[in-house]
Image (spheres, rainbow, N blue to C red):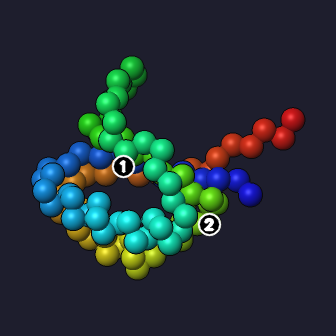
C-alpha cells in the first residue's frame, strides 16, 4: 500500500487560538495513523512564494488521508483553525519505485 501525505502551507493570525486547533487535531491524526514529518520548522524559500509555516503529515494510505480530512474529528478541529489562519493544503499520494 502506498503512503500518502498532507502538505500544508499555513499563515497563522492568532498563535494562541491556533494552539487550540493543534490540541484538537490530535484525535483525528491518531485515529487515522498520521505521523508528522514536518511541523513548522525553519524553512528557506528558494523558488516562488509560500506561507510562513509548512506542515507535512504522513498517512498509511491515500484512503486514510482522505478519511481523516473528512472525519468529524478533524472537521471539529478545522473549525477552530479556520477563523485564525489561512491554509493551502493538498493530499498527495506517495511514489513507489516499481523498477
Percent of width and height locating residue 14: 12, 53
Q: Residue at x 45, y 65 (%)?
A: 29
Vertical side of 24 occupied by 58: above or below: above
Cβ atoms at labels 2 and 1 below 8 Å apart: no
Percent of width and height locating residue 45: 35, 24
The numbered mark at residue 88 is 1
Q: Label 2: which residue?
A: 63
Percent of width and height locating residue 96: 74, 43
Density class for disc 2 (Cα within 10 Å; few <14, some 14-19, many ≥20) is some
Residue 82 visible (yes or no)? no
Vertical side of 65 occupied by 41: above or below: above
In the picture provided, is 41 more to the left or to the right than 31? left
- The N terminus appears in which quarter of the rendering? bottom right
Q: Residue at x 53, y 68 (%)?
A: 32
Percent of width and height locating residue 40: 32, 41
Q: Residue at x 30, y 69 (%)?
A: 24
Task: Name the secondary structure under disc 2.
Answer: helix
Task: Name the secondary structure under disc 1.
Answer: strand
The numbered mark at residue 24 is none
Amino acid at each position: 500500500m502506498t503512503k500518502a501525505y498532507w502538505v500544508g502551507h499555513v499563515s497563522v493570525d492568532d498563535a494562541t487560538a491556533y494552539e487550540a486547533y493543534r490540541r484538537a487535531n490530535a484525535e483525528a491524526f491518531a485515529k487515522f495513523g498520521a505521523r508528522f514529518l514536518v511541523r513548522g520548522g525553519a524553512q528557506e524559500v528558494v523558488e516562488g512564494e509560500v506561507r510562513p509555516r509548512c506542515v507535512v503529515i504522513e498517512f498509511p494510505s491515500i484512503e486514510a488521508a482522505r478519511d481523516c480530512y473528512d472525519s468529524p474529528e478533524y472537521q471539529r478541529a478545522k473549525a477552530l483553525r479556520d477563523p485564525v489562519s489561512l491554509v493551502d493544503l493538498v493530499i498527495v499520494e506517495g511514489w513507489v519505485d516499481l523498477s
